[in-house]
Amino acid sequence: MRNSLFFLSFCFLISFELIAQSKYLIFFKDKGESDYKYFKKSEIESKLLKEFSQRAIERRKKTMGDEIFSYGDYPIYEPYLQHLESLGIKPVNKLRWFNAISTYLTDDQLALVKNLPFVEKVERVKFFRAKKENFYVDFNQLNKTYSNDYGLSLTQLQLSDIPEVHSKGITGSNVIIGLLDTGFRWKTHEAIENTDVIAEYDFVFQDTITANQPEDAPGQDTHGTMILSIVAGKKDGKLYGSSYNSKFILAKTEDIRSERRIEEDNYAAALEWMEQLGVDVTSSSLGYSEFDDPNESYTYQDMNGRTTIVARAVDSAFVRGVVTVTAAGNEYNSNWKYIISPADARYVLAVGAVNSDGTIASFSSRGPTSDGRIKPDVCAMGTSVYCVSTGSYSNYTYASGTSASTPIVAGIAALLISHYPEINQWQVRDAIRNTASQSTRPDTVFGWGIASAKKAISYPLIIQRSGVPFLYKTIFSNTNIDSVRLIVMSDYSQSILVNELMTAEISGFKYYKQLPNSLNPDDVYKFYFKYYSNGVEFRDPQESDLVYTFQISSLKVFPPKKPLNQVSSFVLYQNYPNPFINQTRFRFDLPEQDWVTLEIYDVLGRKVRTLLNDVGISRGTHDWITWDGRDDNGNYVSNGIYFYQFKSLRYKSTKKLILLRK
């Protein structure tokens, strides 16, 4: 029956001529640099200023300075497009960041295009089939606990400390979140009908309607509508989203007529569109591991952040100032098991799923990436997440999957930006990861742990205002704070350089202190806080031997750790447990920052797995690298003796380990 319905709708939508075509990406060799009449940088950038929203320009300035445009932003050379059009080839999507267009080509057109002198290469657009997630209906309610009556959405938000942030008036206002999904029927449900949607676009049918239309499959917009409600919902006593007062940009990028078919070019085009409009945070719940054409499937080796179009698009958005959030995937119970693209992107916040008790969801995809980076980044509740039921005005349901945990984390990012509008995307990413539940020992199951909105907003930040650095600290307390004191010390001694009271903003829980000119912007400094309430002194970090560190020039604030001078020599410890059955952990001490490679070898000296590949790692103790007994191709290796080798610019050491899988 499903195939029959698909065939009928397909016939109505697509002509016979188009059926004989396939969708391709055409990459160009340049953007017309040799045409000096056309390629004038100042004129091109003047035109770009008119194309980009003022919000996008201001967001870019936070991370890019005055050089807000790069070569990737320049438009595709128009004469190339005109030449293709003369051949009957029209673009579906124009991808500036890739200097490419997507289009439909016949076999004859494909052969012709490949030989054009201005064409770099032609690749077929990959189509993914995303796995369905579980939904079921429940209408029970919880008792009111906070200023908002969260109903059954309380559990999912409480696990990430979101209601306490809402109670301080931080609800995501003045932040734009962009969602990429199957479609959005947001105008016909009580919890999302008042959502502030500032733009929406259907990249499947190239129109501005993201809700279902006659040519769509019946459930096309179901998934996206549910995801929108998890971040944007607002109906007292029933549902609140994680960032319910934000503005939203909605992109329909998936086509479920073929088991949720996802086209990479639609995803990339949607990100470029959102970025120009000034989006602050993007959230995508794509979870794909199978392909319409198995012969074109990516492999685990491709999960390196550099291969797929979607991963490269996500990182292109990030370097332009956008906080990018995506689902890690639901693959652990499948043969694939690992995260799926774009969760492999270098800068994206890849989100895993946990149960309401904080244990990992059985389906949540694991890391690492194929080049040895830890993924997922963080987790949030992803089982039985309360959301709207599409197709009704007042019914609700539950969703399970990493796509349900992702909008919770996207909302946390928006809350952080709402509270600190000046911070950039790097600071948002660091604050969320550095305050998650296991940030001192990240692994490839939970990443840095369960994300906490309260802790992320409490994380100290450096903010530049007119070139002057200020250190900010937000304190959540059930009692009145009398005063907050900042103590700054030299990184290599105990000499106190700053010991002064911080100034409170009107809110009463946000404090700041201008950092003195005497601090070298490139040096690293230790610091901690003391605050006083009803005559009682508190310290942050609480442990007396822990300190934060910061560097002004990079705006970096590093999480609490023991002072660096306590790590004075290199040590590679024995892995634990050893022997191991399912997973083992590695630990080493670095007396200075270094570039580290960690590899597994068998007894014949053949490399089995690369866990770290020339990764820059800071001074200190590190115990977050794990191995699950798989090789670089994702296959389980046989039981026996192996060796792990640590190599860096300064040190080299090898130790033996034993795998005893049952």
Image: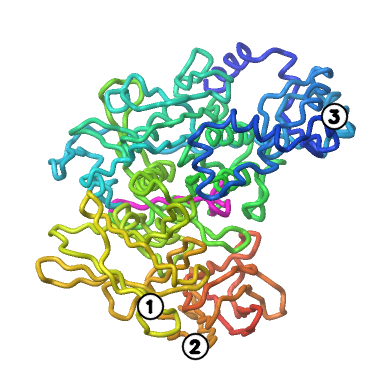
Closest to the observer, 222 or 294: 222
Q: Nearer the viewer, residue 505 or 358?
A: 505
**Which mark lies nearer to you, 2 or 3?**
2
Tell us which disc is closer to us: 1 or 3. 1
Per the image, the residue denoted by label 1 is 489
Residue at 54% in and 44% down: 60
Secondary structure beneath disc 3? helix
Distance from disc 2 to disc 3, alpha carbons, whole Å, reads 60 Å
Spatial CA span between label 1 and label 3: 63 Å
Residue 604 vs 149, above or below: the answer is below
Q: Tell me the residue at 52%/83% (across/down).
A: 591
Residue 264 falls in which quadrant of the image? top right
Front residue (pair 93, 466) = 466
Residue that carries the numbered disc 3 in the rendered image: 113
Instruction: Give amino acid for label 2.
Output: Ser
Residue on which disc 2 sits: 568
| Residue 459 pos. (x, y %) | 34, 60
- Along the polypeptide, which appears first: circle 1 or circle 2? 1
**Residues in magenta, as a range:** 338-356
Q: Does the magenta stretch include residue 222?
A: no
Q: Residue 74 carries which label?
A: none
Q: Position of residue 658 (x, y in %)?
A: 55, 80
> Answer yes or no: do the residues labelled 1 and 3 have beta carbons within 8 Å?
no
Q: In this view, does 538 lie above or below 54?
A: below
Which quarter of the picture shows residue 492?
bottom left
